[in-house]
Amino acid sequence: MSKYLGLDFSTQSASAVLLDVEKGETVWEKSFPFAEYFPHYNTENGILKGANGEVLSPPLMWTESLEYIVEQMKKDGVDLAEIKAISGSGQQHGSVYLNNSWLDTLANLNTSEGLVAQLKGVFSREHSPIWMDTSTSTECEEIESAVPSIAQLTGSAATMRFTGPQIRKFYKTENEGYANTETIHLVSSFMASLLIGKNAGIDHADGSGMNLMDLEKHDWNGELLNATAPELISKLPKCVSPSHVVGKIAPYWVDRFGFNSETDVIAFSGDNPCSLIGLGLSNASEAAISLGTSDTYFGISDKLIVSEEGEGHVFASPSTGYMSLICFVNGSLAREKVREHYQLSWEDYEKALAQTKCGNNGKIMLPYFDEEITPASKHAQVYRFGLNESEAEANCRAVLEAQFLSMRLHSSWMSKPDSISITGGASQNSSILQIIANIFGAKVKKLKTTGGAGLGAALRAYQAHQGCEWSDVFNDFIEYDEKTYTPDPLAHSLYEDLLKVYSACEEYSIASGSDPESERLGFINRWK
Ligand code: XUL
């Protein structure tokens, strides 16, 4: 029996996916929201809000959730001895601070007592800053001015939620706490350490979200470490490949729960790198789009290419080369706002789209219903060009064309994909899929499986343990709808033309570019 376990410690819940690769099936899958299952940590959906933009989570809660998952699997009759390898996913950027009792305690866990009771004294910082934290703008400026090439070096400009600026703030504001810290882990490497009973390395993919790693060399960068906090190198685990076996499962888990002592633990990684795998991406000609509250564009590239505008983030990819991640805040949020405004069902929305044509006769919307990060727009404001708010059908088309023209525009520093996989709620809507195919000039496939970081982690364990091709791994566990959407060549050329007008509208609205009206009228004339 070959079973592989993927664990996922996300912001709101802990979950697990167990795969039986002989059967090609998921045999156990459960999710445990932190607020519901671990209410004694008093979090609001897994988080604690501090002052001045601080957002934190208790690492002891994550610890407890790991043991709880294992107990539930056992209770449900899962034979844990059949698990060949385990990997995991953690929300990115969050950091865990451990004192000088950590390694000893971890190496000598007593099987007759639970993890929480034994580990509650090992933290040098009770709460971990997480990715939602926006309290480090000063530290970002300090690091960026010490190392101006940070974006080219690490794949991201100094970013408030990234680990380096968070560590710097801890060092500056809680000097003693920093001095008492012997080890700093990411959420991912911390959880893996709990399983192996010693420090697990930080994998290159999650390590890329720290503003500390040289992305090309896949190792800590001395200049950035110095600009962040003193003696940081001695506190960080080493960087390891995402497929690295960080260790065998520790005796605590074997004796207490019946795991096999030969079970390999593969480096844990960040949730986005794991999702990339859960979306079936391993090839530079492919991309994926997740249509959620926010929309996310995932790309792969063989070469290290970083956006000159500082857009999106580049991480080492857990499959091949590098991955890009670009987040658009106004995803379903904007689509739903338009649908609700005109009081339409999704069926009516499709009918409205059918009454309009590709390019919307040059009627353009910039749909920043909420503050946008790509492109950076600090004000929640909807801009309309040649488009009146009273035109229901044209507004329905305008919001969708805007979203995917924007995605095409702001991902153009990446290689252009031949094929795009789509997941998330709005992928049910076939008109949206056709618009994406026409705008990108790429074949669009809809994922049947919901993907997810937990599945990605389990697939990473499978691939690393068996050393097989990613395509073999994906064949068994990633399914697509039979229907695919191919671009219409004429519609694609129209959108290539509209892209320039769209870009001019953006420049005009948020970057004081010149009035795009004559370009817009030119487009209308060309495509009458
Ligand atoms: C990515 C990011 C979030 C977290 C939590 O940069 O901050 O996606 O990984 O999901």
Image (cartoon, rainbow, N blue to C red):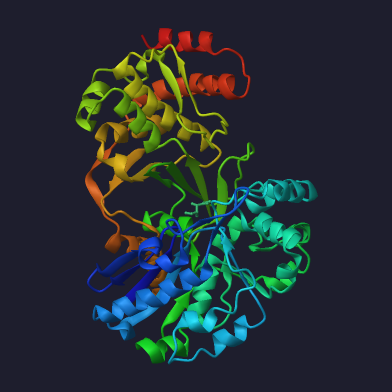
Residue 451, how many percent across, how many down? 34, 56
Residue 182, how many percent across, how many down? 68, 75
Residue in the picture at 29% in, 22% down = 342
Residue in the picture at 55% in, 58% down = 56
Task: Determine which quarter of the picture holds residue 291.
Answer: top left
Judge whether 336 appears above or below 483 on screen.
Answer: above
Judge whether 109 appears above or below 323 on screen.
Answer: below
Residue 153, how many percent across, how many down? 69, 52
Residue 327, how many percent across, how many down? 49, 42
Task: Determine which quarter of the picture holds residue 359.
Answer: top left
Whether residue 1 is visible? no
Whether residue 378 is visible? yes
Please state if 277 lies on the left or on the right of 58 as rendered: left
Please state if 371 lies on the left or on the right of 404 as rendered: right
Residue in the picture at 54% in, 78% down = 120
Image quadrant where one finds the N terminus = bottom left
Please state if 314 lies on the left or on the right of 288 as rendered: right
Query: Exactly how many numbered labels are in the figure?
Result: 0
Please state if 442 lies on the left or on the right of 62 as rendered: left
Front residue (pair 43, 122) = 43
Judge whether 240 appears above or below 374 on screen.
Answer: below
Image quadrant where one finds the C terminus = top left
Front residue (pair 439, 129) = 129
Judge whether 253 appears above or below 367 on screen.
Answer: below
